[in-house]
Image (tube, rainbow, N blue to C red):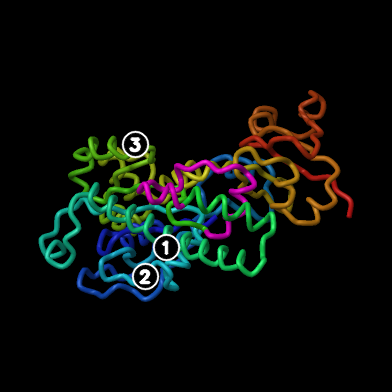
Amino acid sequence: MKLALIGLPKTGKTTIFNALTRTEHSTDKYAPPAGEANIGVVPVADERITRLSELYKPKKTIYATIEYHDYPGIFAKEAESGENAMLSEVKSADAFALVLRGFKDEELDGLYELGSPEKQFQHIEEEMILADLIVAEKRIEKIELGYKRGVRTPAIQAEEKALRAIIDQLQDNKPLRDLQLPPDEEKAVRGFQFFSSKPMLILVNTSEDSLSAWDSTLQIFADKGFKANVIAGKFEEELSKLDSEEAEMFMTDMGLAESIRDRLTHWSYQLLGNISFFTVGPDEVRAWTVERGANAVTAAGKIHSDLARGFIRAECFKYDDIINHGSEKVLKEKGLFRLEGKEYIVKDGDIISIRFNV
């Protein structure tokens, strides 16, 4: 799972990235934008994996992870067209975390006058819509040229129909995440990875003494259908450098139950509608990520393609059951093991073993 930290220049993206990944990339306000993204892999905190590891005592314990990419300021006035290499790379993310500057800095305001978080959001949204519209219109031109040359297949016609609906949506200045296409049309244009179709989390980056001042702004974004949160990026970056006891003391003072590392990974899961299932044993206890609604074959394929190809049955039991009863032997005696077929919908916290034959 890949999530891109995006936003206008000097909004604090790298500060938040440092807090997430416990790294020390430069956050000098006078430094020019970086030429490439910072990349870090962050484990998803999950007490269930910790407890399963204590129970099974495996050789390895592997948590689910999220790969965060911290991109230089995009869609700034100085940025190139929506087809440059950097923006093409941003498109490949599964979702965006849009960082909006809510902290005061007179020097930065002189260098990059961004305006309110609402204004920053509007700028980014409009640029995403424009970039998507350019791509969709160029593709339509190529399809029409192909028609003149006699190239007209059902697949291309489905793509054209979808693109026409997409262009209508974008010309109304509406993002594609609000557009519902029929499954065949959605599949036909999936490869375009349009900016405005991506799920997006909004982070208002402010100072630690202003966290409660943004409730009305967060509500504005919530009313638009976004999950929005306020974060004190600089404070979180400093917190990430402390040992666990000191960090816990400061978090308590701030009324924070979790670090940004844990909060943002959980928000990312919620944003993408992901859940975790587990595999357990003496060699390894591991969390696997699937989309909510995924079936048993999809889950098997996450573990290994051979398991999906030769799928016979999924042997399942619940996390709560193994914790409550303490052993698989007791679960079997109580009839709490289940054999499920290909179409079984995986539940968050399922513990699964795949029976297969290749």
Marks 2 and 1: in contact by CB < 8 Å?
yes
Secondary structure under tag 2 reads loop
Specify the amino acid type for callout 2.
Answer: Ser
Q: Mark 3 or 1, which is nearer the eye?
A: 1
Disc 2 versus disc 3: distance between alpha carbons?
30 Å
Q: Mark 2 or 3, which is nearer the eye?
A: 2
Label 1 Cα neighbours within 10 Å, binned few <14 / some 14-19 / many ≥20: some
Disc 3 versus disc 1: distance between alpha carbons?
29 Å
Residue placed under numbered mark 3 in the picture: 222
- Residue 328 lies left or right of residue 249; in this view the side is right
Label 3 Cα neighbours within 10 Å, binned few <14 / some 14-19 / many ≥20: some
Label 2 Cα neighbours within 10 Å, binned few <14 / some 14-19 / many ≥20: few
Highlighted range, magenta: 167-192
**What is the number of the mark on residue 81?**
2
**What is the number of the mark on residue 134?**
1
Query: Which is more N-terminal, label 2 or label 1?
Result: 2
Q: Which part of the image, by quadrant, shows the C terminus?
A: bottom right
Q: Position of residue 91 (x, y in %)?
A: 47, 61
Specify the amino acid type for callout 3.
Answer: Ala
Secondary structure under tag 1 reads helix
Q: Is residue 160 magenta?
A: no
Q: Main secondary structure of the magenta part?
A: helix
Specify the amino acid type for callout 1.
Answer: Ile
Q: Mark 1 or 2, which is nearer the eye?
A: 1
Disc 1 versus disc 2: distance between alpha carbons?
10 Å
Secondary structure under tag 3 reads helix
Query: Which is more N-terminal, label 1 or label 3?
Result: 1
